[in-house]
Structures are given as structure tokens and as C-alpha cells.
Amino acid sequence: MAKRFYKYFPWLFVLGEISILYLMIWVLLLVFSNYPIPFFIDLFDFHAFAVIWSAVVIVKKDYKLGRTSSYEDTLRHLFGSFFWGMLIFFLFRNYGSPYADEQVPVPYYLGLLFVLAFYRLAVHKSLRHYRISGRNYRRAVIFGKNQWSERLADTFQKQKEFGIQFLGFYDDDSKDLQIMGNSITFFEKAELMGLDLIYLSQRLPPALVKRIIDFADENYIKVKIIPGPNLQLEKKMTFSKYGDFVVVNLNEIPLDQFFNRFWKRGFDIVFSLFVLVFIMTWLVPVIGLLIRLESKGPVFFVQKRNGANNKIFNCIKFRTMVENPWADTRQATKDDPRITKIGAFLRRYSLDEMPQFINVLLGDMSVVGPRPHTLPMNRMFKGQLSKYNNRHRIKPGITGLAQVLGYRGEILNTFQIRARVKFDYFYIENWSFILDMIIIFKTVRELVLQRENVY
């Protein structure tokens, strides 16, 4: 049953997406019936897009929804495929379509992206329920019984959505009653068990590992190694290949990947340009005038802070205090006499941070990331917390996960900075474009609804 599923599911997946595309073109044409493009041109373009999209899905193997993949992985693959599909489509339209001079109905394709995202999430969820029901399973055994292999077996038992039917352990040394047999027993019975997966403990002798792998190759069985305690870290490990030699990357983060950096930087540029052109062009003169009317000094306050890889950059803010020699060494406190009236207003609604979009455009900062601290504060916190410098592995942000979860403003005790750093670690290790959008949404909501500990 499992083999039959793998044979037919890819075609059903692709046919399902094509059916969704043609259903949506009919719906969208009804919704956008007044769109100034002739019906037959829409259909010509859409036929071309459907063919291109089918090819992209098949080449990129989007139908392979991994058993351990998250919904976020599914969306990320969709966005990547949609990018390539639209790129190829526009190239075809410019150089191979008889309607190259006609306007592209952008709402059609944005609508298609939304519906495809819904379709793929629904398929992913359906597959999970299908496997929980006991179908589309893979039969697996574990070779070598220890603490880590037992935890893996327990995971298979508890998380049925993985679709792994665990048959038992094999071990040459253990006399545990749960052991199905030793290596001799395994090779005698393995061909009759219909195995799909063999998991190997790291402590197995190399000669036995080679024999198991050779047997698995001949019988089309996948073999996986269970990492020992040195590799059982709370990190997402990746692999690098140097010719025929493979090494494990223990501390790689999502933003080490070029495609992720490309998306984040692209969004930073577009978002910061929008803010600078449509908001800052009129906001700077207004706020600048109010600042100068209340106190002498510059409109902007430039302060050196630590950025990515601890590189020092000039962080730009609206000046919110009277000029004083303690701006770098003393945090702003409640009822701080240094803060001006217009400065208090700017701080309350975080308007003093708006000029930092210049830093974002220049590449020193990102819209979302760990908040940068002053150089003296950075040195102090580095001495108080181990691994504090890890937060500088990526660009600092105008807003961040810790800030939207309530950890902002004056730092009164070690717990507050430790909590901030903990959330910074989580963000760095689990970055995604969707997480950035959630943080931005929460930031905007907080600006409007709740402003505690801000002064």
C-alpha cells in the first residue's frame, strides 16, 4: 500500500494543483470581469503558466512533503517555486508570447499564490491525518539499543503523524527483552520484513555498519544514523560535502543560507524605502522643528552601537534628550530629567527610532532583529552573560521578538537582559520570513494599543 501511494501521489498532487489553477482562473475572471484585458489573452497566458508551473513543481519535486516537514517548510517551498515559475513565465511572455505588449493581470497571479498556499497546507494536514490513521506508513527497525535509540522509538510511538511503524530493536550486546534479535537474526529475517528504514546507533562497529548499508542498498532500504550525545543538540544541523567527504554543520542558522538572506535583505530595502519616501519626507521637518523649538542641539542623535559580527556602526535616532555627557552610559529611566517633552512623546510611540530606517537601507540594520545596545552596555552585558555575543551573529533590528513580547525599555535586573537574550537566540535559530511578518504586525499593534515600560 505504501509503495502504491508513492507511485501515484506525485501525479495526483500535480493534477490537483493544475485543477486548482483552472478552477481559480474561472473564479478570478468572474471577480475581475471588468479588468481591461481580452478573455482569450488571459487564457493563452494562463495555459502557458499552467504548463510552466507543472514543470517547476515536477523538477523541484514539490510533491515530496516530508514526514517531518513543518507547515512553514511547505510554504517556503511554495514561495520558492512560485518565484521561479513567475520568472520563467515573464521571460516567456516577453520573448515567446504573441501578447508580450499586453498588461499582465497581476491580481490573477496573487490570487493563485494564495489559493495554492491554502491547497498545499490542506494537503499537508490531510497527509498527517492519513498517516495517523495507520496508512502510508514506513516499516522501520533500530539497530543498537541505548538511551538515544530508545528516545527515537518513543518518538515514533507518540507522533503517529510521521507514519513510521516501528517494529523493534536489534542488538548484539543487549539481553533486554525488547530486543528482537542480534545481527545474525536480523540478516536472516530482514528480507521478509518489508523494511523501508533502518536506524543505526553511532556505537555500532564499522564493519557491521558497512554490512548493513550494503544489504540495505541491495534491498532498496534507507539507512539513517542516530546521532550520539555529542550531536544531540538543540540546533538544526546541516551538512557540507567536500568531494566524497561529509561533515556536520553544528551551528548553522537559517540566515547563513543565501536565499534566506536575499529575501530578508530585499524586504528590508523595499520596506525602508517606502518608509523614507512616504513617511520620513514629511515627518523629519515636523519633528525636527519641534525638537529645535524646545531645546538647543541637533535634530538627530547619532550613537555608536554594535552590529552584525560586532561591527560598530552609527545608529541614527531623533534626539529626545537635552545634550548631556551621560547619553552613552546611563539608560533612560522613568521621569528622567534629561528627556524633553517632545522627546517623551517620541519615545512613547517609538518615533525616535524612525531614522533607523536609514540604517536599514544602508545595510547596518534590519527591520527585524535583536535590538542593538550602546557600546558600554554591550561590554557590561557581555561580562554578565555567557554567549551574549551570539546575538550579534545577524544584523540588529528596529524591532525584535523580545520587544514585542514585553521585554523593552529600562533594564533593571539581570533577569530582564537574560530574557531578552534568550528570545534573541530563539529568533536567530528559528528565523523565517513569516516570523518577521508576525513581529512587525505585533509591533504595529503594540504602538497603537499598549505602551508599557516606554520612557
Image: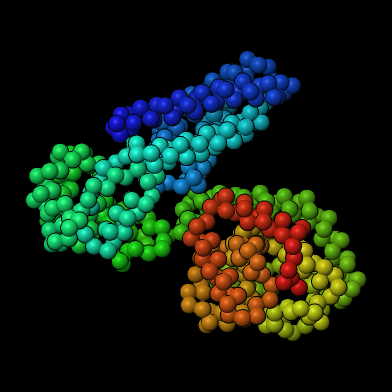
Task: Tell which residue pokes out farthest to the right in this image.
Answer: 293
The C terminus - image quarter? bottom right
Q: Residue furthest bottom?
A: 325
**Percent position (x, y) of residue 272?**
69, 54
Rendered view: 345 above or below 159: below
The part of the image, by quadrant, that contains residue 228 is bottom left
Percent x, y of residue 162:
37, 45
Q: Is residue 61 visible?
A: yes
Q: Is residue 256 left or right of residue 26?
A: left
Look at the picture and state if 322 lies above or below 102: below
Q: Position of residue 112 (x, y in %)?
A: 59, 31
Residue 155 sits in quarter = bottom left
286 on left or right of 370:
right
User: Which residue is outermost to the top?
Assistant: 40
Give above or below for 313 relative to 235. below
- Report how many numbered discs are placed on residues in the image: 0
Q: Residue at x 35, y 27 (%)?
A: 8
Closer to us: 53 or 244: 53
Q: Residue 287, located in which quarter of the rendered image?
A: bottom right
